[in-house]
Image (tube, grey):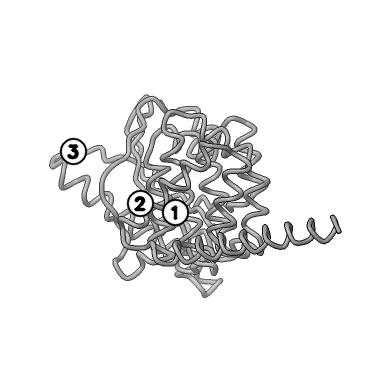
Amino acid sequence: MSFQSHDALVKAVFAQRRHAEGLLKSLLPASVAGRLDWSSLELRPGSFVDPSLRARHTDLLFSVQSPEQSVLLYVLVEHQSTVDPMMPLRAVIYAGRVWDRYLSDHPGDASPPAVLPIVLHHGRKPWSAPTQLHEVVCRDRTLADGVAERMIQLDLVVHEVSEASCLALHRRGMLTALGTLALLLLDKARQSDDILADLRRWVGLMRVVLSEPSGIAALAMVVQYIVEVTGTPTGDLETLLVSELGPGGEEAFVTGAEQLREEGRMQGLERGLAQGREEGRRAERARLLIKLLDAR
């Protein structure tokens, strides 16, 4: 369930151009990003990841135009807490599949697009695996010195997802509020000791998300992700959203809960709600008892 939740969150948010554009701009060298016509950015269909690795990687393919040619931006999101030492080789294989599909769709085209692989990593530790292909396939360093420049060249763009980097990109206007919140959740949800404390730090982002035309639906998606990926008591989550965001937070929670129920994943949520409400009733009874004792 965890992978499906990560995959759904990434695709629901970053398949939308307005959320993807700023992130992609921020990940490319300025000399490259400045040459691209971002108004031409489009999501392309399909996945190029091996079926056996789809629990580890989510991929998105975008096309964008430069003055001279089309460029394909291939984004791989690494969901495992450990890094994949084979990632440069996998990126070459996946890029080959992208080109193969392009040539099948455009027979006779002698000007295939450039494919730029980008990796988003949200593991527990910083990326420590190779980023260049020759580091994977040429372990003999003496051999590598003579072969590296004559083989396929690949130097992965790897972006470490962290709270500091996400918030910095948001402050610079590169990431939308929902894009920032999605990356923060990818980074924190699996490993946080207190996701509710994290959410309190991000209340400002949630308010911005809620203020947008599709804000309720977006925040409902966030609710679903938190419920599925963390062990947060849902009664506590509901209380936080209502107290910090008011009626909009309550509506988002209820909408997310209804969607989970429709998808058959509601049993745990309902148990959590019942537990949270019972705890609330016990706390209220204790408060009234203390008040009565004080009155005596």
Q: Residues at badges 1 and 2 in contact (C-beta under 8 Å)?
A: yes
- Label located before the other in sequence (1 or 2): 1
Task: Tell me where residue 96 sits by quadrant.
Answer: bottom left
Q: Residue 21: where, in percent of width, then height? A: 45, 34
For residue 252, say whether it is visible. Answer: yes
Labels 3, 1: front one:
1
- Between 160 and 70, the residue placed more toward the observer is 160
- Between 198 and 175, the residue placed more toward the observer is 198
Q: Which mark is residue 224?
A: 1
Quadrant location of the N terminus?
A: bottom left
- Between 201 and 296, the residue placed more toward the observer is 296
Labels 2, 3: front one:
2
- Label located before the other in sequence (2 or 3): 3
Considering every residue shown, the one lying at the far front of the view is 296
- Label located before the other in sequence (3 or 1): 3
Q: CA distance from mark 2 to mark 3?
A: 45 Å
**For residue 241, above or below residue 2:** above
Quadrant location of the C terminus?
A: bottom right
Q: CA distance from mark 1 to mark 2?
A: 8 Å
Q: Which residue is mark 2?
A: 259
Disc 3 packing (10 Å; few <14; some 14–19; many ≥20)? few
Disc 1 packing (10 Å; few <14; some 14–19; many ≥20)? many
Q: Which residue is mark 3?
A: 109
Considering every residue shown, the one lying at the far left of the view is 107
Q: Secondary structure at mark 2?
A: helix
Q: Residue 244: where, in percent of width, then height? A: 63, 41
